[in-house]
């Protein structure tokens, strides 16, 4: 998994990068090694924005979060991404099950 962190109007410190690495490794451990994860952090006045984009084989997941605390924004964006990835995994699993049962029905007729 390749992680890229970009800061807009913000300097990316080692602490921020370590926090993201830990959070994303725990959350996205089911992703393949070919997955690209891009995190964009932005500060405007007293608002902090975090955007997480995950690109993997055939799909892209994007989530955003806005709070007054940078770390809370990062955590929320990663959690939203995790939820979207779970939904994607459930959908693809259910489609595989439907397709395999349809193939079995064709062969039994």
Image (cartoon, rainbow, N blue to C red):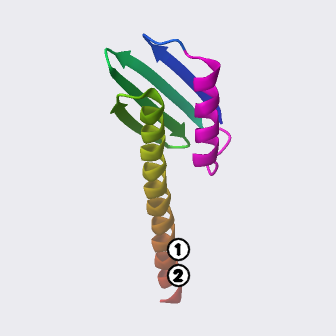
Q: In front: 4, or 102? A: 4
- Residue beneath label 2, please? 104
- State the residue at coordinates (43%, 50%): 84
Q: Residue furthest bottom?
A: 109
Establish if 39 lies above or below 43.
below
From where the camera sits, is residue 26 visible?
Answer: yes
Q: Which class describes the residues within 10 Å of circle 2: few (<14), some (14-19), or many (20+)?
A: few
Residue 28 is a magenta residue: yes
- Residue beneath label 1, please? 100
Mark linked to residue 16: none
Q: Residue furthest right?
A: 33
Instruction: Give the dominant element type of the magenta stretch: helix, strand or loop.
Output: helix
Point out residue 100 in the picture as x, y percentages from the top left corner: 52, 74
Point out residue 13 in the picture as x, y percentages from the top left corner: 59, 17
Q: In front: 91, or 14? A: 14
Establish if 43 lies above or below 34.
above
- Dot 2 lies on which element? helix
- State the residue at coordinates (42%, 10%): 9
Establish if 104 lies above or below 33.
below
The region drawn magenta spans: 12-34
- State the residue at coordinates (53%, 83%): 107
Point out residue 62 in the picture as x, y percentages from the top left corner: 41, 37
């Amino acid at each position: 998994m390749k992680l890229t962190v970009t800061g807009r109007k913000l300097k990316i410190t080692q602490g921020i990068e370590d926090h993201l690495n830990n959070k994303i490794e725990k959350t996205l451990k089911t992703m393949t090694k070919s997955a690209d994860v891009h995190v964009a952090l932005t500060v405007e006045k007293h608002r902090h924005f975090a955007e997480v984009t995950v690109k993997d084989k055939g799909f892209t997941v994007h989530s955003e979060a806005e709070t007054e605390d940078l770390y809370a924004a990062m955590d929320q964006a990663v959690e939203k991404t995790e939820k979207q990835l779970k939904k994607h995994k459930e959908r693809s699993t259910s489609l595989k099950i439907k397709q395999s049962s349809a193939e079995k029905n064709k062969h039994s007729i």
